[in-house]
Image (spheres, rainbow, N blue to C red):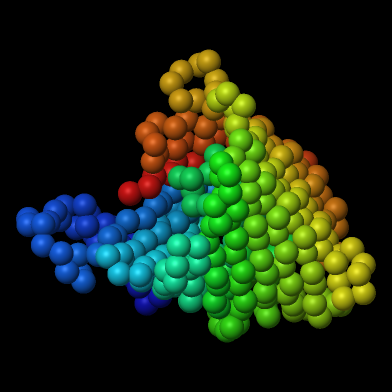
Amino acid sequence: MPLINKFRISSVAVLLLLCKVAYAEEPSAPQKGVMDGFRLGGYTSAGITVPRASEASAAINEISLILTWENESRFKFFGELELEKPLTWDDDNKFHSKQSNIDLERFYLDYNLSDNINLRGGRFLTPTGRWNQLHASPLVWTSSRPVATSRLFPTAINGIMSFGAIPLNTSALEYSVYIETLKDQDLSQDEINFKNTKGARIAFGQQANIGVNLMSFEEKNTTSSRYHMLGLDFLTHYREVEVLGEAFQRWDKHNNSSGYGAYLQTAIPLPIGTNWYGITRIETFQRPDEGHQQRWLLGATWRIKPAQLLKLEFTGGSADQPESPRGFLASFAVLF
């Protein structure tokens, strides 16, 4: 067995062992110290994909470990290390780890400057829209991700950010302002190369929470060196029905349209059992180098427990994406 495969398999075993140890350990005495502020958790998911245009496959999609630290000081730490596709099965290669990759998703330190101002430094997800900030498998309704939330803008940067909330009458105005200070040193095969990112986001509203996003960045291997983007998103509930939507529009340095994307998704309780939800989603997407695409999704999700989801979905429309092929997808996700 090649050395890299041994390393990947060993990594999975170590990560699972660490999680088991974290669950088993309980503090014997209420003594507080620096080390007592650390908490270990994470999430994982596994699934089956039956695409329309290629062979079926099954995989452990990810194993993500999250380490946090917090005590009574003004500092907080958050780190997330993700092992992507550690094990895959398909008819040609049987069991293999050719698609596996270790990714440092997040690694940052927060400092609470005042009641309304917090500072963050390190690697973090860009606060663009909603899906990008809560994309962990147990926190979203579907196995596949809307295309517009992953291929139009940088999803994570290495930089600094100021964020907080300003109280209003019955709610609050949430804000984030950020800038990239160090470009990514390692890119996966299907990842788009963005750099020199800066942006801002505000969100407001109680019954219907609305977000406005502004972003500027460069994208390698395109005709324009810099792009500007406007994004709008909302989340609302009517009785037990959740409605979520996001829309993005990009312009190049000559103010010409250079890509857009949007989706609308609903989650509706189903009368077939406990905690079953019907999921629908429609999408539109366009990039200069990928053309225009329209997609749809129909599915059902069973929230077995608050941190355990079983997802079944059919995706159709035009074109396939690396992480969102047309066809049938089923997955199970758990937060631990």
The answer to whether residue 258 is left or right of residue 22 is: right
- Furthest toward the front, the residue is 169
Q: Which residue is drawn at 31% across and 66% down?
A: 69
Would you say residue 229 is visible in this rendering? Answer: yes
For the residue pair 93 and 57, the one nearer the viewer reads as 57
- Furthest toward the top, the residue is 271
Viewport quadrant of the N terminus: bottom left
Give the quadrant of residue 132.
Answer: bottom right
Q: Which residue is drawn at 56% across and 57% down?
A: 166
For the residue pair 248 and 292, the one nearer the viewer reads as 248
Q: Where is residue 280 in the image (x, y as percent from the top left)?
A: 66, 33
Q: Which residue is drawn at 36% across and 55% down?
A: 42
Q: Where is residue 191 in the image (x, y as percent from the top left)?
A: 64, 69
Would you say residue 50 is visible in this rendering? Answer: no
Q: Position of residue 36 (x, y in %)?
A: 19, 65
Give the quadrant of residue 3.
Answer: bottom left
For the residue pair 134 and 114, the one nearer the viewer reads as 114
